[in-house]
């Protein structure tokens, strides 16, 4: 099944898709510091860890570690990364993995409804980003030999990562 999902991701224009064990994911709660001090969405974004009812990082890690495999999806297009992760989550669900779960930086709306103190317009698709649940994206993707660099200029090509967590 994993090969099917990787092939599907690549056919949907992901730049890379790799399957890894959950132990290959680098959890580090310090990522929340970058959210709290530096993100303009802190306290506003609908998938932000500052929102009411967001699970504590330790609980998120405990739950995510129950999965067996994670498909890491890379794209230089944020929307593609998210669309691929949703499609793979759905396919895995249809294949019998009822708890398959995708994660990505949200690119569903032009502007997050949370910024206007409104409810999410896409609740069924809204998912948290890696860093917001305590995953060190840089360390994880570098460990896997994938590309991710700190941008020195806003015009540089960005690398976006999403994932699908599978049983």
Image (tube, rainbow, N blue to C red):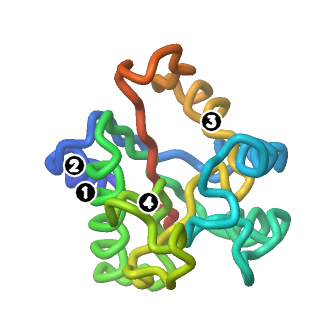
Marks 4 and 1 sit apart, C-alpha to C-alpha, by: 25 Å
The reply to whether the C-beta atoms of the residues labelled 4 and 1 are less than 8 Å apart is no
Find residue 44 and report its image quarter.
bottom right
Question: Which x, y percent locates residue 109?
Answer: 33, 65
Between disc 4 and disc 1, the foreground one is 4
Q: Residue at x 59, y 62 (%)?
A: 68
Q: Sequence-wise, which precedes: disc 4 or disc 1? A: 1
Marks 4 and 3 sit apart, C-alpha to C-alpha, by: 19 Å
The reply to whether the C-beta atoms of the residues labelled 2 and 1 are less than 8 Å apart is yes
In the picture, measured across the screen, residue 94 lies left or right of residue 25, that is: left
Between disc 4 and disc 3, the foreground one is 4
Question: Which x, y percent locates residue 157?
Answer: 35, 23
> Crowdedness of circle 1 by 10 Å Cα count: few (<14), some, many (20+)?
few
Q: Name the residue under label 3.
A: 140
Q: Mark 4 points at which residue?
A: 106
Between disc 2 and disc 4, the foreground one is 4
Q: Which residue is drawn at 29% across and 40% down?
A: 77
Q: In what element is the residue under mark 2?
A: helix
Query: Looking at the image, is 11 positioned above or below residue 159?
Result: below
Marks 1 and 3 sit apart, C-alpha to C-alpha, by: 23 Å
Query: Looking at the image, is 32 positioned above or below residue 109?
Result: above
Q: In what element is the residue under mark 3?
A: helix
Q: Sequence-wise, which precedes: disc 4 or disc 3? A: 4
Find residue 31 and report its image quarter.
top right
Q: Mark 1 points at which residue?
A: 4
The reply to whether the C-beta atoms of the residues labelled 2 and 4 are less than 8 Å apart is no
Q: In what element is the residue under mark 1?
A: helix
Marks 2 and 1 sit apart, C-alpha to C-alpha, by: 5 Å
Label placed on residue 7: 2
In the picture, measured across the screen, residue 118 lies left or right of residue 90, that is: right
């Amino acid at each position: 099944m994993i090969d099917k999902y990787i092939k599907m991701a690549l056919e949907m224009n992901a730049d890379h898709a790799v399957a890894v064990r959950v132990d290959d994911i680098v959890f580090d709660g310090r990522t929340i510091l970058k959210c709290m001090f530096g993100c303009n969405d802190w306290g506003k974004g609908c998938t932000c860890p500052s929102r009411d009812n967001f699970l504590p990082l330790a609980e998120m890690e405990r739950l995510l570690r129950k999965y067996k495999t994670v498909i890491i999806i890379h794209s230089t297009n944020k929307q593609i990364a998210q669309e691929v992760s949703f499609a793979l989550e759905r396919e895995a669900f249809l294949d019998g993995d009822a708890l398959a779960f995708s994660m990505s930086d949200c690119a569903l709306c032009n502007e997050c409804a949370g910024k206007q103190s409104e409810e999410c317009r896409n609740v069924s698709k809204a998912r948290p980003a890696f860093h917001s649940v305590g995953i060190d994206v840089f360390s994880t993707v570098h460990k896997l030999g994938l590309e991710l660099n700190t941008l020195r200029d806003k015009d540089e090509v960005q690398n976006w990562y999403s994932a699908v967590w599978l049983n």
